[in-house]
Image (cartoon, helix red, strand yellow):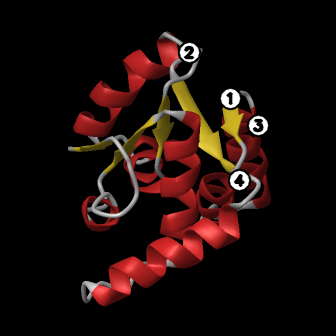
Amino acid sequence: MSDVLVDTSVWIDFFRGDRQAVARLDPLLRDDRAAVSGPIVAEVTSGARTPGAFQQLRARLGALATLEPPPDLWDRVAAARFSLARQGTQAHLVDLLIALTASTAGHTLLTRDRDFSGIAQVVPLDVELF
């Protein structure tokens, strides 16, 4: 059963063969603990260079658990973005969607994107940066 939502930044480095990303993600894949969400799949697959690579990425990511966003997602995105803006931080909508999906599902967010540390100030989120 999955318990880690793997962010786009990790997948990109993993598919590029980055040693740290491979070492961190391989055990999660082996133990069926890695999950994705719609925005993550869209971000990763849209970077494919060929139609064949696009289809291969879709198939590989499609084999993983896919987390669905909460039903009140946009209200929660707006509230979190409002709170962050009052603190002087302008968060990206997709990052907030990913953070709230992980939070709602009770999953850790595995990322290399430090923006999620700021988001975790207003969204109850377990972030693992490496």
Q: Can you identify the residue that label 2 sits on?
A: 32
**Marks 3/4: CA distance?**
13 Å
Closer-to-camera residue (18/68): 68
Disc 4, SS: helix
Q: Residue furthest top?
A: 31
- Quadrant containing the C terminus is top left
Q: Which residue type carries mark 3?
A: Ala
Q: Which residue type carries mark 1?
A: Ala
Q: Quadrant of residue 105?
A: top right
Q: Can you identify the residue that label 4 sits on?
A: 38
**Marks 2/4: CA distance?**
18 Å
- Residue 65, label in figure: 1
Residue lying at 72% horizontally and 60% vertically, measured from the top left: 72
- Quadrant containing the N terminus is top right
**Marks 1/3: CA distance?**
12 Å
Residues marked 2 and 1 touching at CB (< 8 Å): yes
Closer-to-camera residue (17/5): 5
Residue 25 position, x and y percent, is 39, 29
Residue 82 position, x and y percent, is 45, 83
